[in-house]
Image (tube, rainbow, N blue to C red):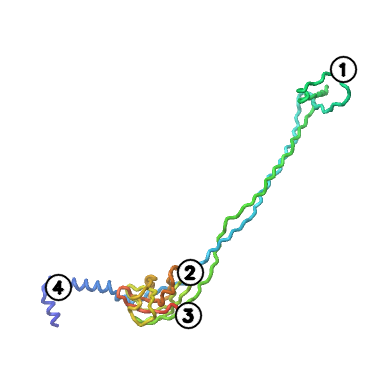
């Protein structure tokens, strides 16, 4: 009662100052400590991630014959000239060994090298119209077959993950239950999966891999080498946390739900407990 009377007896300016300080302190406590999270559950239900497939490359060569071009044959062409038909036939009569006739003049050496062609023309008189038939030689074109090599084809062979570890949460700073499973994916990465998780909520919670063994010590898991897998997605449900393939999982012994703001471990579990 004395405190109330004392406050009532203060001046208006002092009362306003005290009120502002009280409000600011309340806002700071709510924003920094986030006590409301202790009464709010965040449920996250994730399916197990699909197995990462391993890519394999195979090359297949297929021979594709080219289509042969069609054979083209020129049809006979019939021409009707106005003049009578004149047929010229080359002289193919070979010289004989008989004596030359009178008046025959021997050919010179130049004329013997290039003998003249003697032609005989025969004209058929009295024919008003005659036909000359010219037949073009048939032309056949066949394309050579070609071989086409198919480009390399890439196929993926999915493989299932391998279960490496199964363990249960232990309560350190706050009570919690659920199963922690560790899988190795075909690409070498690992997945830390929480199933049926049910732990306390809080501010600035991270999921970490720690080199510390499983001990009942709220600060032990951050005092040694640790790797953050990101923020806790929710304090209830099923969740996945991916470990990059370049991380050596043998360097860590435990997984923990850790409050970074206050260096306070809520729960922890082993990550090398063999499956039953």
Locate residue 264: give its quadrant: bottom left
Graded by Cα atoms within 10 Å as few (under 14), some (14 to 19) or many (20 or more), the crowding at tag 4 reads few
| Count of numbered circles in the view | 4
- Find numbered disc 1 in the image and state the secondary structure of the residue it sits on: loop
Which numbered disc flags the more N-terminal residue, 3 or 2?
Answer: 2
User: In this orientation, which residue lies closer to the viewer: 113 or 166?
Assistant: 113
Residue visible at 77% across and 23% down in the picture: 109
> Can you tell which mark lies on residue 188?
2
Please identify, in this view, whether the residue under mark 2 or under mark 1 is nearer the observer: 1
Position of residue 148 measured from the top left corner of the image (x, y, whole percent)? 62, 52
Which disc is residue 274 wearing?
A: 3
Distance between mark 3 and mark 2 Cα atoms: 19 Å
Q: Is residue 245 above or below residue 124?
A: below
Q: Are marks 3 and 4 in contact (CB under 8 Å)?
A: no
Question: Is tag 3's residue or tag 1's residue first in the polypeptide sequence?
Answer: 1
Q: Which mark is residue 15?
A: 4
For label 3, the crowd category at 10 Å Cα-Cα, with few meaning under 14, some 14 to 19 and many 20 or more, is: few
Nearer-the-camera pick, 211 or 17: 211
Q: Is residue 114 above or below residue 54?
A: above
| Real-space CA distance between mark 4 and mark 2, rounded to the nearest whole angstrom | 65 Å
Q: Which residue is mark 1?
A: 102
Q: Residue furthest right?
A: 98
Helix or strand or loop: what does disc 4 sit on? helix
């Amino acid at each position: 009662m004395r405190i109330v009377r004392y406050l009532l007896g203060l001046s208006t300016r002092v009362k306003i100052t005290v009120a502002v300080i009280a409000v600011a302190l309340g806002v700071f406590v709510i924003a920094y400590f986030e006590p409301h999270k202790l009464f709010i559950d965040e449920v996250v239900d994730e399916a197990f991630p699909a197995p990462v497939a391993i890519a394999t490359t195979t090359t297949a060569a297929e021979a594709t014959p080219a289509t042969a071009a069609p054979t083209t044959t020129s049809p006979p062409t019939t021409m009707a000239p106005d003049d009578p038909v004149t047929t010229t036939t080359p002289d193919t009569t070979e010289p004989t060994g008989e004596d030359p006739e009178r008046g025959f003049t021997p050919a010179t050496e130049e004329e013997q090298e290039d003998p003249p062609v003697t032609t005989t023309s025969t004209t058929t008189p009295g024919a008003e119209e005659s036909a000359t038939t010219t037949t073009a030689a048939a032309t056949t074109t066949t394309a050579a077959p070609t071989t086409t090599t198919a480009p390399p084809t890439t196929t993926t062979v999915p493989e299932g993950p391998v279960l490496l570890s199964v363990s249960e949460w232990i309560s350190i700073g706050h009570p919690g239950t659920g199963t922690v499973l560790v899988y190795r994916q075909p690409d070498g990465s690992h997945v830390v999966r929480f199933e049926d998780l049910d732990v306390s909520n809080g501010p600035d919670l991270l999921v970490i891999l720690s080199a510390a063994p499983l001990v009942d010590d709220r600060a032990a898991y951050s005092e040694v080498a640790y790797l953050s897998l990101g923020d806790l997605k929710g304090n209830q449900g099923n969740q996945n946390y991916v470990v990059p393939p370049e991380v050596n999982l043998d360097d860590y012994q435990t997984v923990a739900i850790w409050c970074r703001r206050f260096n306070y471990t809520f729960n922890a579990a082993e990550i090398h407990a063999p499956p039953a």
